Every structure is written in structure tokens, then in C-alpha cells.
Image (tube, helix red, strand yellow):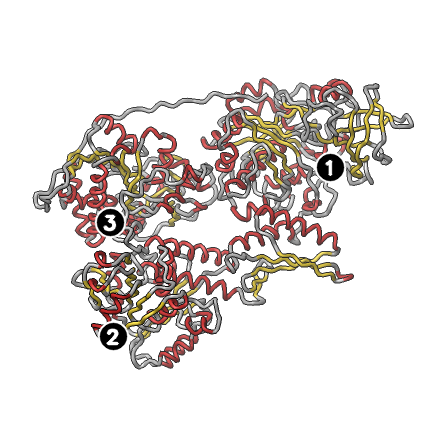
Amino acid sequence: MWRFRSAALRERTSTCYHRAKVSSNANAPHSNGKRFQHDLALQLDYYMSPQFCGVASAIVNGSYSSKGIDLTVLPTCPVGEEQASVRTYLDANPSVVGMGTVEQNIFIPTLQAKPDLKCTAVAAMFGESPLCIASLNELSSDSGIGTHEDTVDIMRRILDSDKAVASPRSSKINDLLSNKYEGIQAYTTTEVPTLRRALDGKDPIVTRLEGLNGAKLGYSQVLFAADECLQDDRRAIIEAFCEATCDGWEHVIRNPKEAVEMVKEAQKMLGLDDESNDHWHPSDDFMLEMTEKCGDYVKGTFEGDRYGVIDKKRWDEANGWLLQGKSEGEIDGFGLDAAVWQPSQQLLSGNNLARSILSKAKSSAECFQKLHGRKPSLAVVTVGDLERYKQGDRRREIYSTASESWFNKTAAGEANGFVVKEIRLNSSATTDELLSQIYTLRDFDGIQVMWPMPDHIDTARVYSAINFQQDVDGIHYIGQTEIGNENAYPPVTPAATVALLDEFDVEVKGKRVLVIGRSPIVGSPIAHMMREMGAAVTVAHNQVPLETLKEIVGEAEVIISCAGMPGAIKAEWINGAVVVNVGTTFDEVKDSLVSDFDGDIEKNASRFSPVPGGIGPLSLPILLNNVAKAAWDGMGTAGSVLSNGWELETAKLRKKYHFDSYKEALDAAKKVDKLSTVMDHHANMQFTHKCVDGVDLELEFFTFEAKQITQKDYDAAQAVDMILSANQVKMSRYSYELDEKSIAQYPASPRGSSKLLRCEANGNVAYHGNFSKSFASMVRGCHLVFNDSRVLDARLFVKDGSGSNVELMILDLGSIDVEGTCVGTPLQAMIRSSEVKAGDVFQEFQGKGEIEVVEVKGIWEEDEKSDGNGTECFVRIKSNDSVEDYLASAGSVPIPPYLSRESQETDKEAYNNTYAENAGSVAAPTAGLHFTEAVLNEIGEKNCSYLSLHVGAGTFKPVMVDDARDHEMHAESFAVSVRELKRIIAALKEKKPLIVVGTTSSRTLESLYWCGAKRVQGLDNSSSNNLFLGQFDWVPLKAMAGRSVSRVAALEALVEGLGDDDIVAGSTALMISPPNYEFMVVDHLVTNFHAPDSTLMLLVAAFMKDGTGSKIRQIYENAQKNSYRFLSYGDVCMFSRPGS
């Protein structure tokens, strides 16, 4: 029987709105050719401030009015209620176009929970979330974080901690400065600049939330519209609103000081209430800094020819994190209409491709640093002042941010995990001086010498001095590829050209390709690459007559212009070709980049790369990507060895393990094969026999498709080290001296009067004399999980052929149907005799039928002092009764063998839990023996969930090997209803601490987590009623995902698509032991005192993060001194996980 619970219902309250009408600026330009005149209501998700500069600019400049939009700005609503506010307003004003702004991390969960709000995102003002944690000191694991009330759940998920607590926004700075919280949720655009001023110019410690522990929060200041407004002519109104807003942002980015005044003017025009808070610094310089920071986030939305564009791939990636556990179909495009505000398909836009390449370069750099303890490094050498760098600062201001600007590689490198040293020599430096500088840079992974160099420099000598392994700017590319070096780094701009053509599926094979320009770093390598790609290439240069140039431009199917000469080519010469604008020049009069073409490219080209927004954004990401590759290649030379002993070779990881015998080596290979199967990434293995010196097992990982070492290879190597490392899990460390007088022969009477030992997360221990009087008050506000498996009378006494009495113990009932007939169900059993063979027949002691041995497995050992306590075998009982009924009539209570006594009638009740229901155990989940109906009632049914793990006799098997990793765990069957699992998930979402009663319940929940994690990572397609987790399956899963799969997401993956009455079931051989296992689900553990040589000691030690065994030994030894009773009928402990 499975317990059912009713769902709680929540009511939504309605809100009454007033509105502020925007009046047009009398001096603003107006269009006499308006396509429409329509009311549009806008709900901002905060007070009018620099984060809405684009809106302010469009209001003050009359841009909305000029496009036929009468704008109404609604009053600021409660946080998180923006969608509901728009919906409520439109219900009362159905003819109005309704729009709003909100962060994707709020918008998507709200829409998923309340689809009746019926709204869709169309654009975004910020390319990513500016959310962060600001603190005065480094945060500890116990730090309290003051958090916005609408993002508490997300913060707790990111931090995997309940330390994030809701706090008022208005006083957050003072709360931090007064040490009320150790950190606060903040915005890099607002609170961080305010804090710096409060700290007299000292920067607070800032931890960005985007990317922290895998978090993907997505876009910020998302512009959304009510669904019905995306129909008919109102769709054009929304597009016009986006255009006016993004034009406003362009004005802001180019004129930030003017934008500050526009915000002030817009505040006056709207006449809305202002917020009273402490995170706005009352100064114009603060407003200017905030405006510039917001502008940088807006730049992250530029694509093609406009700001505000949402990239569906990036949107879906954030959705995947925000809606973790949902299927790909549920995530795909959820909440987004990307077609409203997109650049023309005629454009070959490079911004999103650049962001993707930069993200990969950053990830590669972070992985490199993690493995090698240093960042990839680049040295940039410039001689004299480069003409194109004179406008570098202005180009950065209007086109890029510090983290992605070609014109500040030091800052860009630092932001993306690289060390960049920029070296500037004066224009009079000689060739020898430049060479001397280059020779000092041997320790850098990459070297870039900026061109052009002064005429007196011998460029051939300079370029020859750069080792091709450091040549991240690709000056040696053509020569290296000609001699067959496929690993040569391509020049940055040519590589960007090829990447852009590939991204938009522009085929050059067999096409007439014209390359205009022949510089050694751009034009010539591009022509070389195009030839290698099968194009018919023509190269034009400044000595080609104008008429000839006109002719070959008209004949070309693909034109790649690298001249860097504005207006050198007439757009009217183009005859439907694809045009890639490589050469660009900054026009100070136009305050803009311009291409080599004069005229309307759009009219004459079939497709073309825009300026800006085409090739330019790709240059820095490709350069850093080359540097990252150079760093890996540099460490990957033959013979270099990582700190974990793995040897790096070209595109391979290799390591040898030594064993004393072939058997040990084969056992290790089997373990590697199992974890490789879980990861779907297998190792090459080679055995080398060294006679009396044993056997070497050499393992090799590589990724065939990538033809280089990938993160998957490093994950696999880490997983192998966990199970094969020389650091043994010595069982002797987790043992203790158990006085026989401490073993409880009988349960406490009455039930629940046992003692309780409480061990806090900080290690403090308290002793309580009566469990029933102490426990319920300790667990208020928590959710408890119990194992409701019921013990059957699995011990039988039989007569052998000579008439001697022999014990027969059923070892496992969890894997069979106990309601099936005995004759049709082979049973795993132990017969306490060493002389048992297949075909032997035993008579049940009470004359209830014959029992035949059908298969002998081997010796059964219950303790390390014996040479075997019996024979493990399979038997068949010759009876038509069900297994459950037969054992009830013929069997006796299977109390543990260490009690050294016969079971008694009182054991029938005492050795089962009061809530036991699902028959299938041959040993009790003893942590539950302390719970009475009265204690359960005091805890409350709503605070309890139940699952079943059927305990086998393997629980009695001691660890009899030196290295506990070599102990073979017996698989045990588990089952939990979807309804109960959903109750556990709900408790986790409510941030209730999870108290798990018993090691069996703990193993089940931890196993369910890893089964769910496999599913989230796409590594398991088995049904939810046929799950399996091997002894070390968690190792590769941890290596691949760490803690990036939350416990909620993992459990939700198991119940997805199932009804409440369905069952999630399977079996687990999970072994939990220190020092590597980290509990993923359990916060607090209730369990008895365990035998010194048991795997349960290892589980508790792992829970306590006790890598040496010293903590648990001390606790147990002190408990004995305080007269606590041990083992199945003994007293009980409650442990809190350190850091929980």
C-alpha cells in the first residue's frame, strides 16, 4: 500500500492599477507618415532609472510618438508580478497593446507555473543577467546571503544551500555594512558601484551568478508582450516599439552623459513614485557609471544591425537550466517569439557566433587552469602607435565591452580566464631590440606581434623568431599547412571569415571567389584557405586597374574585401554575390565603422556581413581560442605529466597502474569497463606481464571525433583515479573495539524509550536519555523519509539426509514476487553447512514440505574470523503456497546472527517497524524501530514520506578486504510511488531539511539521485520501474557533472510523465564510503550504532565527511562509555551533515 496526499491550493490576489501617460516632447521629431496610431501600456520591472535608459531616450526624443505609439507606463508593481500586471491591465483594456520587462530567470518559471498569463518574450535589453553576490569578505559555506524575495529559490539552487534568505531590497547596502548578512544579492550595475563609494573607493568582492555552479539565468530586461497582441496589426506595433527602444539604447551608448539627463527628464514626465532605498548613490557620476554599465549589457544583445535581439539557442540553454528536468520539447522556444525582432536573413551576423566561440575559449581556459594551476598566457607586442588604434577607445565605447574588446586585450583576457601582457615599444625600436623582447617571451603560450610594423623593422626576421607553437596569430600558417602541419594556428581574421561562412552555410567549393587585398596576415591567408576549400580564387590589390576591378567584382560569386580603404569598391558593381566585409575603417566624422564599399550593398548582394556586427566581433574570441589551444598543445608534448600522474601525449591521456597479479589487473579492468559504460566513453587498455614483478595495466583516453583531448577524457581519468588510486579505503580506519556488553540483545521496552545521540553539523555531540521525549521537537520544520519495508520470517530449520537439524536462511526477497508460489520461485539462501551440493533435498522441520538445492554459489561468510558460516545457494520450496504465506507458517524471525540466540515471540513485533507495509526484507531497517505511533503523530503525516528498500542478508556481510573498494556490494531492490517522490521533491523546493531515517532509506534516495542524474545527462533511457545503479556508477557521474545536477532536477527527471499512482523502482548496489563520496540528497541521518567491520560504518563516515575515521570512532567510543547500546536492537543516533 502506498500513501496518498492531497495537494494544497494557492489563491492569487488581484491588483488595482493607475497609469502614467507619456506626453510627447514638443521639440521631438514627428513623422507625418505614421502607419498607425495605437495605445501601448508598458510595465517596467523597476523604477525609471538608467537600466531603462533606452526607454527614457525614446520617450524624451519622441521616438514612440513618431512611430504612432501612445505610450502608457504602468506604476511599479510588486516584484515578480510583472506578467500578472500586464494580464490584469489588458483584461480591463483589451484594445491596448500590453508589454512589460522582466528577467528571463523570473519570466520563464512564472510562465511555466502560470500559463494562463499568456505572454511571450520578443526582445531583450540586456544580453545577460547582472545579478551577483556582493560581500566585504570571502564567503564561507555558512554565510547568510540577503536575497530578493522573488529569487530566493534560484539563489538557493545556485548555492545548493538554504543560506539565501529573503531580505528587503531597500536596505540591502546597510544590511551588508552592518554585518546583518555576510553577502547580498546585488546588481553589478547598481549596488556594486554604490558599495564602492560607501567603502571609499574600495571594491567589494563580486561573485557573478551567471555560470556559478552551472547556473544559466539568461537574458535580463526581457521585453514581453501579451499573446493576443502578437496577432494582426498589433504585431507591427510591438516591432515599432522594439525599434524605438533599441534606437534609444544606441543613442544612450553613444551619448551616456546626455542619457543621464534623459532619465531625469523621463522621471519628471512619468510622474511615478520613486523608490526609497539605500543602493542609489545621490550623484551624477554614479548615474553615469550605471548608465555605461547598463550600456555594456545592452551591447550583449547586438546582432546584425540592431540591439535587443534574443538568440534562440542561448534562450533555450537558459530555459534548460531554469526548467531543469523538463524535456527538450518542453524547453524548445518556450516563452519566445524570436521572429518579431530579428535582423534580416540577408545578413551574415557575427555577434552570436563570437559569443559562442568566446564562451568555449573561456571554458577551455578555466579547465586548463583547474588542471595545471595556471592560466593560458598571451604576450602582445606593439611597435609604435598603430593608426587604427587611435580610435580604439571610441570603438570599444560604442561596439564592445571590456571583456570582448580587441583594443584592450589585457582586460578581455582577465575577464575570460587568460593572462595577457601587452608590451609597447616606441617607434624607434630596432629589429634587434624587438627580437630581444620576443626572446624573453618563451614562457608564454602565445605571442602576437601587431602589424604593421615600422618600415625599418625586418619583418621576416621578426616573424621567423616566433616559434610556430606560439604563433597564435597565424603568421606561419601557410608554410606550416604546406608541410602538412594540421595543428597550425590559423590567422585570426581569416579564421573568422571561414567561421562566418560555415555558420551561414555559404558554400565556396567550385565558386568564383574574389579576395581584395593581399596582406600576409589577412588577404593572402584567406586566399590560401579559399583554395584549400575548393574555390576558384582571384586576388585583387591596389595595382589592379579600376575597370578590371569592376569587371572581376561583377563576375564574383563570393567577394571577401580586405582592403581597409573606405569607398574603394562600388556596391553597384556587385552582381548578386555573397559579400564578406573584412576591411573596415573608423570614420571619425560619422562616428562609425565603414566598409570598403560605397553605396547600397543590401540592394546588390545576395547576402553580406554587416559593418559593424560581421567579422569584427569574431577576432578576439578566435585569438583567445588559439591561445587556449596553444596552452593545451604546449602541455601535451610527449612526456609531460599532470599532477594526477596522467601523461599527456598528442590528443591522448595515458597512465599505467601496477598490480601484483593478473587477477588484480583484470578486476581493475572490469571496474574501468563498468564506469566507461556509464560515461559512454571507453578506455583503450593494454596489459604488460612483468613475470615476478606483476602486471602493468595501461589506460588511454582520447576523443576520436575531436581528434584532441576533451573534457570528457579528463572526466574519465578522474573517475578511474577514484576507483584505482593507491590511496586505499582502509577498513581498519573505520573500525573500533565493540564491547560485547554493549550489544543490545533485546529492544528497549517500551518501544521508543531508547537513548538518542545527537551530533550537530559542527561536530558537537549531545546525549538524550529518551528518544520519544526528545526527537519530535528536534525535527520541526523538517521532512522525514522512512523505509516501510516489512521483514518476513525468513529463517527456516530443516533436516538434512542424515536427520540432522540445519539452519536455512533466505538471503534476498526483494528481487522476487513474494506473492508468487514457492514451487515457481527459486530463492537465494544460506544453508548453515559446508557440505551442500545441487540436488540435495532437505525436509522442513515442521513437516511443511521438501526444499531442494537447485544451484550452489559458494561459501557464505558472515564474519572474518571464520572460514565460512555456510553455503550460499538457490533453493526451491516444494509447496503451492505463496512465498509470503509459507514463511509466515514455517519460518521464524531472522534476527541477526550476532545476537547468538533463538528468536522469540516478542521479536515478531519488535523486529518490524510500526509503519512497515511492503513485504520483502530479511533484515529490519532498524533505525525505524524507535518510532512509535505517538511520535509519528507528533511529527505529522504531512511531514513524512515513505519508500521501500528490501533489506537483504548481505547487510550482515563484513568487509573482509584491506581496501573497502574491493568489497562487493549486493544489489537490493527499492520502490517508491511517484506520489511520495513528488512529496519529497516539494519538500526540497520548500527548502525543508530532509531527515532520512536509516541507512537503507539514505542509499535509496542517493541512488535515486544518481539514476536521475544519468537521465538528466542523457545517459539512461531505461524505464522508471527498471532502474539500476552499480556499486561505483556514481563515480563517473560525479566526475562529469559534479554537483551541477540539483537534487530536485534529478528526482524530477524520474517522475516526468508519470502519474501519481505509478511506481519508480529498481535495484542498487551503491557503495557509499569516504573520502570521495558526497551526499547529494540527505541533510540529516537517523541511524543505529553499526558493527565495526560493516559498510554501514563507511556510509556514516562518508556522511560525516570523515576521511580518516577518527570522528566516527571517537563518537562510538564515547557512546560506549556513556552506556549506549549498539547494533540492531540498540540506541539511535541523529547526525547532521557538515555544511548542511
Image side of residue 157 versus residue 81, left or right: right
Q: CA distance from mark 2 to mark 1?
A: 86 Å
Q: Quadrant of residue 698?
A: bottom right
Q: Nearer the viewer, mark 2 or mark 3?
A: 2
Task: Give the class, few, some or many, for how many residues have Cα within 10 Å of label 3's Cα (few <14, many ≥20).
Answer: many
Secondary structure found at label 3: helix
Q: Is residue 804 above or below residue 738?
A: above
**Mark 2 and 3 residues: CB-CB less than 8 Å, in contact?**
no
**Which amino acid is tagged 1?**
Lys
**Which amino acid is tagged 3?**
Thr
For the N terminus, the quadrant is top right
**Residue for badge 3:** 291
Say which mark, if any, is on residue 957: 1
Say which mark, if any, is on residue 967: none
Image side of residue 415 versus residue 921, left or right: left
Secondary structure found at label 2: loop
Q: Earlier in the sequence, mark 1 or mark 3?
A: 3
Q: Is residue 481 above or below residue 942?
A: below
Q: Earlier in the sequence, mark 2 or mark 1?
A: 2
Give whichever of 38, 472 is nearer the camera: 38
Q: Which residue: 32% across, 66% down? A: 513
Say which mark, if any, is on residue 542: 2
